[in-house]
Image: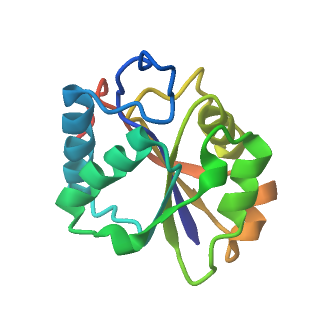
Amino acid sequence: MKTLYLLRHAKAEFGLSDGSDFERMLTPSGKQDAVRLGYRMLGRGMVPQHYVGSPALRTRQTLQRLLEPLSQGDEHVEWVDELYHADEMTWLNIISSAPNHLHACLYCGHNPALTQIANRLSADVQWDHLPTCGLLVLEFEVSNWRELMGSKGRLLWFDSPKSDTT
């Protein structure tokens, strides 16, 4: 059994005047949303073993805030350059290359590819777009991460700042 967490970065500032999308920071509400999500995950006993994120500033800040209530440190996080502006196949290849001793991994990144991956891998729901700080948790009846390529996962939980879930 493998559990896949897909997280879109929290709400970020609009583009900087120099046009640097990579350096966009989280807004104050985005920072709060990421911490709150971490507490909700902890309350549900949903604490991934490993975290993988795009190296963009907003994804770094999202994961740093999320990890605070989970009592997880940076040693559990892997920053993967290819996830910034990655397409659907790049995402699938990175997810499917997770070490098999890990049973629960969280991936944090950007739309539109994150929504495309969610729709491709979910057996239960389809999204127009994952909202900022939207978390989708899917469970797969597979023993190897590579098997996700041809599988559909069962939705365990969806949360976002606009949802009423606790």
Instruction: Find residue 131 and report its image quarter.
Output: top left
Percent position of residue 62, x then y: 34, 44
Which residue is found at the position 27% from the left and 59% from the top? 67
Q: Is residue 151 visible?
A: no
Total marks placed: 0
Which residue is found at the position 40% from the left and 30% from the top? 24
Rendered view: 107 above or below 58: below
Q: Nearer the viewer, residue 78 or 125?
A: 78
Percent position of residue 161, x then y: 29, 29
Which residue is found at the position 50% from the left and 27% from the top? 20
Instruction: Find residue 123 and report its image quarter.
Output: top right
Rendered view: 54 above or below 116: below
Tell me the quadrant of the picture where the N terminus can be found.
bottom right
Rendered view: 37 above or below 75: above
Rendered view: 83 above or below 85: below
Which residue is found at the position 50% from the left and 35% from the top? 22
